[in-house]
Image (cartoon, rainbow, N blue to C red):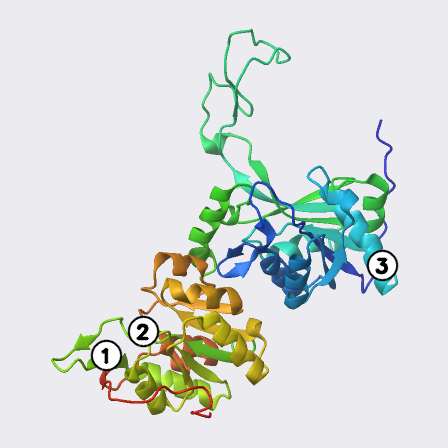
Amino acid sequence: MTTPLSAPTPVPAGARVLAVIPARGGSKGVPGKNLAPVGGVPLVTRAVRECLAARLVTDVAVSTDDPAIAEAARAAGAEVVLRPAAIAGDTASSEAAVLHAMDAYEAMRGGAVDVVLLVQCTSPFLTREEVDGVAAAVIEDGADTAHTVAPFHGFVWREGDDGGTPGRRPGDGAHGVNHDKATRPRRQDRPQDLLETGAAYAMRAPGFRAAGHRFFGRTSLVRTDPARVLEIDEPDDLVRARALAPLLDAGSTPTLDDIDAVVLDFDGTQTDDTVLVDAQGRETVAVHRGDGLGIAALRRAGLPVLILSSETNPVVAARARKLQVPVLHGIARKDLALKQWCEEQTIAPERVLYVGNDVNDLPCFALAGWPVAVANAHDVVRASARSITSTPGGRGAIREIAGWILGPNLAAPPTDPPYAPLTAVPSAPLSAKDLSQ
C-alpha cells in the first residue's frame, strides 16, 4: 500500500536545480558506450553541454565509476561524483545513482538541492529545451515529477497467450496490447498514446528521497519531437545515431565564442582532391578564392589558423605562404602534431575547430572539440563530424565555415573569379614556426 504524499510545497526562488547524468563505464551491450562519439562528440559530453546550456539548471554532475568518463565530464564543464562499486553494476538502478550523486553533491557544495534531474546521455539527441521543459514543469508549474514523452501512434502487439485477459482463450496467439485486433480504428479516432523517451526526468528533491523512485505525486509530461527519440542500447543504435547526427545536428554551427583556433586539412578540403600532373611531374591543384578570403577574415578576427597535411608537397607550402598561415605537412600522425601544436599555442584541443574530408582525419576529429566535414567527405568522416558544410571541399567550404564563425557577411558567395590554379614549385617543407601569424 502506497502512503499518500502531502501537497507539494512551492519551489523556493533561486532554487538549486541539479542535473545528474549517470554514466558508468561497464556497459556490456555497447562497450565504452558513454564515451562513444556521435556527431564527433562523446555521448557524455553531448549531455553535459545541453544541461549546462539549459536556462533553469544551476549545477551539473556526472556520476561515474570510470576515470576516462570522469575526465571527459570535467573537460565539458561538469562536476564529477565518483560512484561506489555497490551501485555501479549491471543491476544498479538509475535512482540509486541519482540519490548518491545528490547526497555527495550537497556534501561537497553545502546547502540542499531543491530539484534534481535525471538526464540520460544514452539519448544522444537530447536538447536544452527538453531539459528546461521538465525542470519548468516542476519549478514553474507545480508538478512533483516530470519526464519527456513523444507522440506514439503504433499498434503494440504481444506474443503468446495471456490467460489473464478476459475473452482470450489458449491458442489465440499474438494479441493487441493497446488495441483490439478485430478493430483497426483510424489514428485520429484513437486515444493519443505517449511514449516515454528516457531522455530527461525532473523531481522535487525531498519527494524523490521519500519515494525512492522518479514517478511520485503529480507527474507532468513534456512532449518532444519524435524524430529525435533514440536510446542507445545496442550497437545498431549507435550506428543509427551516427547516421542521423548530420541531419539532427545540422543547426549546430560554431560561433566565435565556441572556438579558439581553426585547423585545416588541405587535399580534399581546400581543394576538390583533384591533382593535375604535367610531363615534368609537377602537380597543379585548384583552390577557391573565397576560401582565401575566409581564412584572411578568420586571422583578422584573431583566430590562429593552421594547415595540417599528411602530404609532403610543395603545393601545400606554397598555398600556406600565400595565405600567410603556418603549415605542418608530411605528417604521418596528424593527431599527435595537432596535440603538440595546441600545447605550444596554449590552446585547449576541445576549443579547436578541425576541418577534414577523409579517414586519416578521424584521429584529429577525436581530439578536436569541433570536428567539421566538408560536404563531399567520406561517409565515415561525415558520420563522425559535429557539423557538415553544404559546400564541397575546394568549392568554398572554408568560406562557408568562416561565415558560421564570423556572421552572415561571410556566408555570401564571393564575387571575384572562383578558382585560382596553384602549381607546385620546389620548396623545402615548412613547419609551424616558419610562418608566424
* Residue labelled with disc 2: 267
- Give the class, few, some or many, for how many residues have Cα within 10 Å of label 1's Cα (few <14, many ≥20): many
Residue plotted at (60% across, 52% down):
34
Name the amino acid, label 2: Asp
**In the foreground, 109 or 304:** 304
Above or below for 403 versus 212: below
* Residue labelled with disc 3: 106
* Residue labelled with disc 1: 285
Q: Residue furthest top?
A: 170
Image x and y of residue 94, in percent:
72, 44
Say left or right for 33 vs 65. Answer: left
Residue plotted at (36% across, 64% down):
358
Label 2 – label 3 distance at C-alpha: 52 Å
| SS class, disc 1 | strand
Q: Quick check: marks 2 and 1 in contact, CB under 8 Å?
A: yes
Give the total of numbered labels: 3
Label 1 – label 3 distance at C-alpha: 60 Å
Which of the two discs, 1 and 3, labels the residue nearer the N terminus? 3
Above or below for 80 versus 204: below
Name the amino acid, label 3: Glu
Name the amino acid, label 1: Val
Residue plotted at (86% across, 39% down):
5
Q: Quadrant of residue 126?
A: bottom right
